[in-house]
Image (spheres, rainbow, N blue to C red):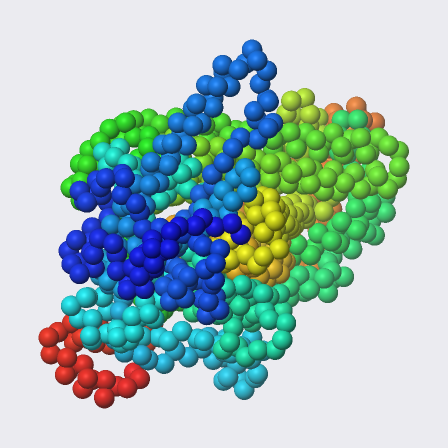
Amino acid sequence: MIRKKVSGSDAQDTGLLIGLGKSPSGLYEDSSILPNGGAGRDTFDVDDDDDPIYIYGDETYGYPRSASGNYFRDGKTKIDFVLVWEEKLRPSKKRRNKHPHPEGERAAGQGAGWEAARGRHERWRQKYLKNLRTTGLLMEKEETLSDRKGIHYMKLSAPWEVLVYYAEELCMRAPLQAHPNPDRNSSDDLLQKLHLPNIMAQQVPKKPVDYYTCAFRKSKLDKFLGSEQHDSYFTNTQRHRIVYEILARTIYGKRKHAEMGIDRLLNEGVYSAAFPLHEGPFELPEYEVLGEELNPRQILYRFWAQWRCWYKYQPLDHIREYFGEKVAIYFAWLGFYTAWLLPAAAVGTLVFLAGLFTMGTNTPAQEICSSGGQFLMCPLCDTCGNWNLSEICPMAKVGYLFDHPGTVFFSIFMSFWAVTFLEYWKRKNATLAHHWDCMDFQEDEERPRPEFAAMAPHMEQNPVTGVKEPYFPERDRLSRILTGSMAIIIMLCVVMIFLVSVIMYRGIVSTMMYHTGNTILMTQAGNIANISSCMVNLVLILLMSQVYTSLAEKLTRWEMHRTQTQHEDAFTFKVFIFQFVNFYSSPFYVAFFKGRFVGYPGQYGKLLGMRNEDCGPGGCLIELAQQLFIIMVGKQIVSNIQEFLIPKLKSWRQKRKLARVRGAQICQEPKRWEEDYELIECEGLFEEYLEMVLQFGFITIFVAAFPLAPLFALLNNWVEIRLDAQKFACEYRRPVAERAQDISVWFFILDVLAQISVIVNAFLIAFTSDFLPRLLYQYEYDSHLRGYVNFTLAYAPPSFADSNHTMCRYKAFRDPHGSQTLFYWKLLAIRLGFIIAFEHVVFFCLRLIDWLVPDVPKSLEVKIKRERYLAKQALADNQDVLLTQAAFYPAA
């Protein structure tokens, strides 16, 4: 590696500063000089000619073995953050020779603009680093140079005084007293009571210690556990959070223009990346080592990210210790959701098997199969011929798998399952939030987003902070939101157009199949058209998802939301509304609209000159099951392939680009910061949550038609957890640890989907399933359903029979003149009554469950009271009380 040299005296001076833990300006002796956020003090307006405290690499300066890549060259100072920027040393020959002479002036103008931008970025960078030095951060610089490009790495470290100052300002939690942290799990407790071995448990080394904690106070430092150990008192994630806070607050330009923070510098292209380092490689040693000898990243890979851990509990405490609470909460929710899918998948599989084993007792299917030429059916299209009902014998048998009394029970079961799952997740979430010290976490007054700060046309005083900051009028934002809503409505209309196109495609294909003259194709024309249209629909859904996500992102940026939270909430709402319509419009059409507007022979309803679709020979439920299987499972397969391949391709591209810069030094072992820069940037958790929420909708809203949906969701989630774990442990740069106490707006969306599922399943059973018509027929005519098929078939009107030269039948409760029969009106009343009764009973039981299951377990309430008591005593002047209590409660 080529590193920039400095004089020996300069290296000694700066090395001494690092070794002593002092800043050049001597700020540590007086903590009041530490800027409140490092952004609003006049001390930042220092002379641009001052040299920042860089420690440049020297070819003769070796790295101590103990550093492990996460320390400065002294082997003692921890690297808390790395800033990276790339610099083109000279334009390529291709760029120089790109423009012929007549275009020379334009090329020169472009070159001048590029040089101006480069100069501006350099000034911002120098001032930013100078201001970072003023806050007390220690710095050390490395460079990798080639003929055309240089990559600069600025390593940052926060000394003890800086950490203490910002820990109090950020309201971090300080340990008071250790208490047991057993690996307890509800399934583990159940297996112990049953005296069964637990194959899901595993002993993960270096388990983090659990403490009673309180808010950090510098004046009470001596009362906190481990405060005398400056090197290890703050965890690495706490150090990262503090340094990132400094980076986010530090000014690089003019404050009145909100030229502040690392996020905006990244958006402006001043820096290429900013990230904390991983704690070593994830690859396991080739030789056998003890678990205690592995680094934290290797522990996560060995006990979490490997495929052989698919049935093991996730080491949530280790995930939180390494990635922070926000990432850990996601994996805790995903694991909890996957565990709750086990009973749902088991019951759904049993319901499906019950239908399979009782298929032979289905009297209507037996009558269809044995009817021969008894029931001559009316043509399915205007150019089709008559057909015998016995031809659909296989579909009649298969349709029973998705339309029998067991599916009604399962839809009720899943309604209770969804709400009970959410209630118990609230309990689990409260336990984790307390365990991870973020139960009372509240986001401080958020800073404006970098893009908002750059594009806002006005400056106004913030009523909370009293500081002038970028401002965008609410009236203008509202007009933009309304305009964006019009764009959303247009996109939803496009989805409807595609849905109509798929419907027409289905009709055209089925007609073409029928006219081939092939007996097999004629018999299976409906199935072939339905399955192929589902495939086409899936492709359109996935394409529209990509298009709309990009559009929603641009619309949300255009709306100019001030904070990142407001921006993310608006973006989430837009994307979810569209994806809900995009993914569920086709199943909704099949479930509630297909076959409702067909009409009857001689008076068929038409759309764009084509007859309206009727349900297939097996009924609409089997078509709905086909739709759900292809859309849900197909989406899962495509998503998993993307999650597996895309990060690897991005990482390969990044490594290839950096390999060209390293050139001849590629044979040397890269340093930790170089290896981490080769990884891809963490893309957040939005797509992961969205995928799981859409899956939750599939397994709850239409579960009456597809009882195997929870099983496929369970299988997918086992894969999903490992794919996500590998991305975070192996392929992503380490994200900045963020605090979070819940899954944010996603819980509200899940709750809405659970409520919608009750209503949809009620209508599905009442109007789409044959459950109620069969039940009414059993009550009024025959309890064994004998003659049910003949009862459900109406005769075509005489006028149609005369023109068709034959009498045919069609499925409807109509008299020979096409009017609705009395049985139809009785059935309609029963359907409406069933919906009202179903919804009231289920919602009453759900409210009862909500009342009976407290959001916070009683055992947790005791822990919270105990912690508050200890915090009160710790922050009191008399510390003897705390010592006395610790003697009475050594490990409460």
Q: Residue at x 33, y 53 (%)?
A: 10
The total number of labels drawn is 0
Q: Is residue 287 left or right of residue 557?
A: right
Residue 367, above or below 467: below
Q: Residue 861, how many percent across, how many down? A: 28, 73
Residue 531, above or below 384: below
Q: Residue 289, how many percent across, how many down? A: 57, 78
Residue most extreme to the top = 102
Between residue 276 and residue 644, name the one nearer to us: 276
Q: Quadrant of the C terminus?
A: bottom left
Q: Quadrant of residue 558?
A: top left
Q: Residue at x 37, y 76 (%)?
A: 209
Q: Quadrant of residue 470?
A: top left
Between residue 299 and residue 338, name the one nearer to us: 299
Q: Residue at x 23, y 66 (%)?
A: 216
Q: Residue 433, how many percent across, how many down? A: 35, 65
Residue most extreme to the front = 8
- For the question of whether residue 70 can be seen, the reply is yes
Between residue 23 and residue 734, name the one nearer to us: 23
Q: Is residue 560 left or right of residue 217?
A: right
- For the question of whether residue 772 can be seen, the reply is no
Q: Residue 355, how many percent across, how many down? A: 69, 61
Residue most extreme to the bottom = 888
Between residue 255 and residue 718, name the one nearer to us: 255
Q: Residue at x 39, y 27 (%)?
A: 116
